[in-house]
Amino acid sequence: MSTITHTIARFVAVPAIICGAALGLAGLANATTSVAPQGPGYSYSPGTHAHPAPTAKPGWNGNHGPARIAHLQGR
């Protein structure tokens, strides 16, 4: 590559990379959501909650450990 071509390519590429980074950071800054607190105090929890599975057992013991693995494998 000749010196002139190299200089022109660098003259175009460097600002393009800098502008791309600036646009990426601007998009990242604009992506934040502004949510006002709801209810008493500063509560940022969601207003909707999923219903539990109908066959779920409460607690850690019913859903973990060797007995659970044996149950899943039909033993």
Image (cartoon, rainbow, N blue to C red):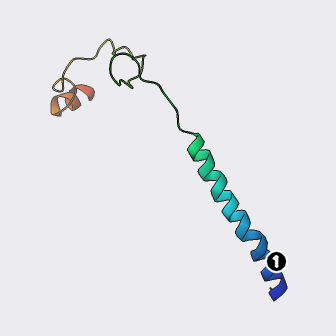
Q: Position of residue 34 (x, y in %)?
A: 51, 31
Query: Which residue corresponds to the image point at 17% horizontal and 33% vertical from the top-left?
Result: 65
Q: Position of residue 68 (x, y in %)?
A: 21, 28
Give the vertical position of 4 relative to 48 (above or below).
Answer: below
In the rendered image, the quadrant that contains the C terminus is: top left
44 left or right of 25 in image: left
- Outermost residue toward the front? 41
Instruction: Describe the element under mark 1 as helix, strand or loop.
Output: helix
Query: Which residue corresponds to the image point at 84% horizontal and 85% vertical from the top-left?
Result: 4
- Outermost residue toward the bottom? 3
Decide which of 74, 63 is in the foreground and name it: 63
Query: Which residue corresponds to the image point at 68% horizontal and 58% vertical from the top-left?
Result: 20
Q: Position of residue 7 (x, y in %)?
A: 79, 81
Q: Amino acid at mark 1?
A: Ile
Q: Is residue 5 visible?
A: yes
In the rendered image, the quadrant that contains the N terminus is: bottom right
What is the tally of numbered marks visible in this picture?
A: 1
Query: Which residue corresponds to the image point at 74% horizontal and 69% vertical from the top-left?
Result: 13
Q: Is residue 2 visible?
A: no
Q: How many residues crowd mark 1 within 10 Å: few (<14), some (14–19), many (20+)?
A: few
Decide which of 52, 37 is in the foreground and name it: 37
Q: Position of residue 10 (x, y in %)?
A: 75, 76
The quarter holding residue 3 reads bottom right
Residue bearing mark 1: 8
